Amino acid sequence: MTTIQRIWRLRNRLIRLSGTKCQDCGLVTYPPKAACPKCGSRNLIEIELPREGEVLTYTVLNIPIKGFEQYAPLIIAIIKLGEAKVLAQLTDVKPEEVRVGMRVQATIRRTAPTLDGVVPYVVKFKPIRGEEADLKEREAEALTA
Ligand SMILES: [Zn+2]
């Protein structure tokens, strides 16, 4: 199997965003939990989250921790994915382009090697093309209206 095929398989596996939903209080969490962080119930079911969502809020880290310097600035966002709120990194976007309400989609990216030399792949979120321009247009319209 070629590397490309392997990455593609990995991508399909990793990009399935599994969360858990509490059957007692309804809280949806990602990544999956063994117990509900809100009510402590262990009565949870696994659910698949949508791959597209919306930026609820975000922050920009200009000085990341050691080993992540080449990724600066890091944009960390809370993203509404269906019923879940997910903390994740944004990619393929500059800090000044990020907007609350921006539509984003899950993507798989390499991250910094761990101390034992493993290069992990993680889920990040990137803007959905076209949406970004639409949002800026709507903002501009709102300002001139
Ligand atoms: Zn609960």
Image: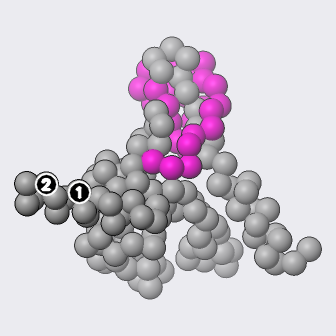
Residue 47 location (% of width, % of height): 62, 32
Report the residue at 44% width, 85% height from top: 70
Quarter of the view holding residue 13: bottom right
Residue 18 appears left or right of 41: right
Q: Helix, strand, or loop for circle 2?
A: helix
Location of mark 2 (residue): 142
Residue 44 appears left or right of 144: right
Q: What stretch is highlighted in magenta?
A: 27-53
In the picture, the quarter occupied by the N terminus is bottom right
Badge 1, how many Cα within 10 Å: few under 14, some, many 20+? few
Q: Distance between the residues labelled 2 and 1?
A: 6 Å
Report the residue at 16% width, 58% height from top: 141
Q: Does the magenta stretch include residue 73?
A: no
Residue closest to the eye, 36 or 47: 47
CB at mark 2 closer than 8 A to ligand 1? no
Location of mark 1 (residue): 138
Report the residue at 51% width, 14% height from top: 24
Residue 88 location (% of width, % of height): 45, 57
Q: Which amino acid does label 1 sit on?
A: Arg
Badge 2, how many Cα within 10 Å: few under 14, some, many 20+? few
Q: Using the rendered image of the protein, determine whether residue 58 is visible from the camera's viewpoint.
A: no
Q: From this view, report whether residue 24 is shown above or below residue 74.
A: above
Q: Which amino acid does label 2 sit on?
A: Ala
Q: Using the rendered image of the protein, determine whether residue 45 is visible from the camera's viewpoint.
A: yes
Quarter of the view holding residue 123: bottom right
In the picture, the quarter occupied by the C terminus is bottom left
Residue 21 location (% of width, % of height): 55, 27
**Mark 2 near mark 1, Cβ–Cβ under 8 Å?**
yes
> What kind of secondary structure does the magenta stretch mostly adopt?
loop
Report the residue at 46% width, 61% height from top: 128
